[in-house]
Amino acid sequence: MGLALRAFLLAASATRVFASCAHGTFLRPRAEGGTVEVAKFGYTGAVRRQGPLNWAALESPANGVCATGTNQSPIDMVDGVFSLLQGSDVQLTINDMPDGAEFENLGTTVEVITQGGSLAVADKTFELQQFHFHLPSEHLDNGTSQAMEMHMVFQSAAQEIAVIGTYINIADGGAAPAPAAKRSRIFGRQEATPPAVAATTLLETIFSVVDQIAVPGTKVTTPPLVMSEVVDVLKANAFQIYAGSLTTPPCSEGVSWHVSTARLGITPASFTKARDVIGFNSRYPQNSPGEPNLLMMSALGSATAAVVAMAGGGVVAAKPAE
């Protein structure tokens, strides 16, 4: 097992990688002087390229957990893989940004640098660092992909990371807060058919200027951002929580995921503008938490990979950037 896995992980030369999901946290601090660093990984291509199949080799051994970790994200949010937490049981605050916010193109996503906010849950407090977007959604809702997904990335004083993931659907009408999602009386989770949503004002405001950062490495200041609309929607719904990982290199595990049952909305015109800049930037769904890594299964065979995963061997822990 050792030689096969080692050869798999070292299939390409090491290259410094900047992670979108961890951007602005202790794992990937922002560059000094306001420079926007462009990520050096991608979402397409196999071995010797920059796609997810080769993330582990882009910066070895730091990214090794991308290929060996057994609690990787994103996943299919089906009953049994998450616990349900009501939004009313979470303390979530995000400051409005009356002067706008820095909106930058990292090459792998577009990201808003926030100006204050916190998430308090289970006696832990996390501070909001940034939020960014994936197209299509990375998490699946009971096997179904959504148009987009927003990730709000929080960090605690103890350098723990929590992420709120929120699905974004194509809106039916004018700007208004998205309604609360319908719930199953049996399972208490999102029903298979998502409810109709109206356009979320925050998203319309942000993506009104996305065409101004079409080139990776560029940034712009958004119009004023009112965050209370989204906060109210999140708190009026519930969170599907599980322990997973970053969905970009170094794929660090121990991330506390809160996937909202709410839906935000974006107009077709704004979706097209976002798509033309972001392109495709979603990691393929991983196995359910605790199951062998898909890449390990591919390299070693499912039976051997299961034994290795159960024994805890071959898992390379991601390390913070120096």
Image (cartoon, rainbow, N blue to C red):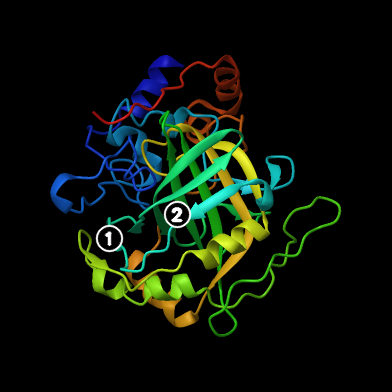
Image quadrant in which you'd find residue 257: top right
Residue 59 vertical position relative to residue 154 in the rendered view, above or below: above
The C terminus lies in quadrant:
top left
Corner quadrant of residue 49: top left
Question: Residue lying farthest right?
Answer: 186
Residue 251 position, x and y percent, is 42, 36
Secondary structure type for disc 1: strand
In the rendered view, tell whether residue 309 sits above or below residue 233.
Answer: above
Report, in whole angstroms, how far the alpha carbon at label 1 lies from the one at label 2.
16 Å
Q: Residue at x 20, y 58 (%)?
A: 217
Work out whether residue 8 or residue 169 is closer to the camera in this orientation and state it.
169
Q: Residues within 10 Å of mark 1 (few under 14, many from 20)?
A: many
Q: Nearer the viewer, residue 302 or 286?
A: 286
Residue nearest the viewer, comparing 182 with 298: 182
Sequence order check, earlier mark of 1 and 2: 1
Checking the image for residue 85, the label placed there is: none
Q: Quadrant of residue 141?
A: bottom right
Q: Secondary structure at mark 2?
A: loop
For disc 2, the neighbor class at 10 Å (few under 14, some 14 to 19, many from 20) is many
Q: Is residue 149 left or right of residue 46?
A: right
Q: Kindly report which numbered mark, 1 or 2, lies closer to the viewer in this rendering.
A: 1
Which amino acid, by three-letter code, is at mark 1?
Answer: Asn
Residue at image coords 59%, 33%: 123
Provide the residue designation for mark 2: 282
| In the displayed structure image, the side of residue 278 where residue 308 appears, left or right | right
Q: Nearer the viewer, residue 169 or 116?
A: 116
Question: Considering only vertical position in the picture, is 290 above or below 178?
Answer: above
What's the residue at 35%, 68% (across, down)?
98
Give coordinates of residue 264: x percent, y percent: 56, 67
Q: Amino acid at mark 2?
A: Ser
Q: Is residue 144 visible?
A: no
Residue beneath disc 1: 105
